[in-house]
Each structure stands twice: as C-alpha cells, then as structure tokens.
Image (spheres, helix red, strand yellow):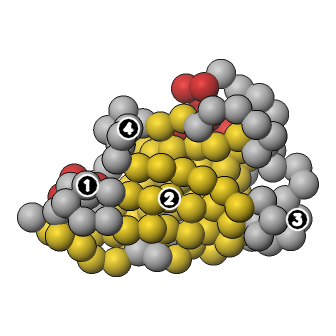
Amino acid sequence: QVHLVESGGGSVQAGGSLRLSCAASENTRNIYYMAWFRQAPGKEREGVASIPTRGGPEIYADSVKGRFNISRDSAQNTLFLQMSSLRPEDTAMYYCAAAASGWVPPPAALSTEIYNDWGQGTQVTVSS
C-alpha cells in the first residue's frame, strides 16, 4: 500500500494559478499510474489528469486541457499538478491517487476503478 499526502490547495481568484503536490511513500515500485481526481460537493469524483510512471503520454480531462499540467519527480516520489487559468467550476477537493493496474486504455486511466491508494485530499476554491 502506498501512503499519499497532498498539499498546496487554497483559495484563489478566477484566472489565478495553484500548484498541488502529492508526496508518496517509498513503497512505489508497483505503481503504474499516478493521477489527480477532484470532487465537488454533491458531485461524483472525476479524473483530472493521469501520468504513467513507466513512460507514455499524460492524460487529461477535456475540462482542464491546456490549463492544467501533471508532472512527476520520480527521485522524490512526488506528483504535481500545476493549475492555471482557474475557474470557479474548478472548485473541489483534489485527491492524489496511485494505481498498480498495469497498462490500461487511456480513458480508463482517469477512472476511479483502477486506483488502489488515495490521499486525504486538499481543497481548492476559486472565486469569481
């Protein structure tokens, strides 16, 4: 099991930027994907961005393409989400997740079903 701890959330005005971080425990050898999800009140958890740990393209939800960038520092076992041009509809609790699934077709990399380990979440609030 991988222990994940998010940080970097906060409140920002529309058009602003935030950078989220997710520190993973050392037991990351079996991770195949790391991802960011978000959940707004009354809504289902949705995939935002995913990155394969063994090479391959990042995958983004259509709603964040061109505004968000997912990256990973493998030496530090840290996952990042750079968020720019933030909108009020980006307001949510953001979660880091890890999957030991092996390769899946790209859309599935944004599905909660393949992720085994989750962080506790960090709140992002965007005001208009």
Taking the image as shown, residue 3 lies to the left or right of residue 106, namely: right
Characterize the local packing of mark 3: few (<14), some (14-19) or many (20 or more) Cα atoms within 10 angstroms: few
Whether residues under marks 3 and 4 lie with C-beta atoms below 8 angstroms apart, the answer is no
Q: Residue at x 21, y 55 (%)?
A: 87
Q: Which amino acid type is shown beneath numbered disc 2?
A: Leu
Q: What's the mark number on residue 37? A: none
Is residue 127 among what the camera can see? yes
How far apart, in angstroms, are the residues tagged by discs 1 and 4? 11 Å
Residue beneath disc 1: 85
Q: Which amino acid type is shown beneath numbered disc 4?
A: Lys
Q: Label 2's element?
A: strand
Residue beneath disc 2: 81
Taking the image as shown, residue 72 lies to the left or right of residue 64, namely: right
Q: In this orientation, which residue lies closer to the viewer: 116 or 5?
A: 5
Residue beneath disc 3: 27
State which mark lies toward you, 1 or 3.
1
How far apart, in angstroms, are the residues tagged by discs 3 and 4? 30 Å
The picture places residue 63, in percent across and down from the top left corner, at 32, 38
Q: Label 4's element?
A: loop
